[in-house]
Amino acid sequence: MFSSQDIDHSQRQKTAADAKAALLAKFKPRPANTDPRFEERAALRAAELAQVRQARNEARDARRQSVADAAQAVINAEAALAAEALSAKRGERKERKALSAAEAKAKRDARYAARKAR
């Protein structure tokens, strides 16, 4: 029969210390099993990472290039419009000059004809 009278103070302390040690043992690090293919997997991960980075860089460069191309197209279109406007302005000026020259010639001819008629 179990008698609680037989347990003394030192026995209780020993039991408590054992229980505490068992509790702490759960948190101690266990020896790790090293993966024999760890190096190989790390190399594969690094290669995949490099490939993903390269793809991202290429996509980023393509986006930048498309933005630059669009900006250049806008600049070219504006330059073409400006050149067309300048050409139209020059054409109008040439027309005005030709008209004024024709009017001046007509006036001269009229004066000359008037003089001849006298």
Image: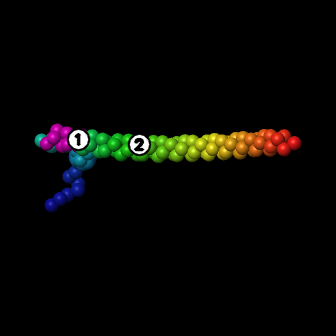
Left or right side of 109 for 81: left
Give the amino acid at mark 2. Gln
Q: Within the image, what quadrant is residue 45 found in?
A: top left
Which residue is rendered at x = 12% and y = 41% of the image? 36
Q: Nearer the viewer, mark 1 or mark 2?
A: 2
Numbered range of the magenta stretch: 37-46
Q: For residue 38: magenta? A: yes
**SS state under label 2:** helix
Q: Within the image, what quadrant is residue 115 found in?
A: top right
Q: Within the image, what quadrant is residue 48 found in?
A: top left
- The residue that mark 2 highlights is 65
Which quarter of the image is occupied by the N terminus?
Answer: bottom left
Q: Earlier in the sequence, mark 1 or mark 2?
A: 1
Residue 114, given in percent of the width and then of the height, sits at 84, 43
Callout 1: 10 Å neighbours few (<14), some, many (20+)? few
Which residue is rendered at x = 23% and y = 54% of the image? 5
Which residue is nearer to you in this view: 71 or 91?
A: 91
Which residue is nearer to you in this view: 67 or 24?
A: 67
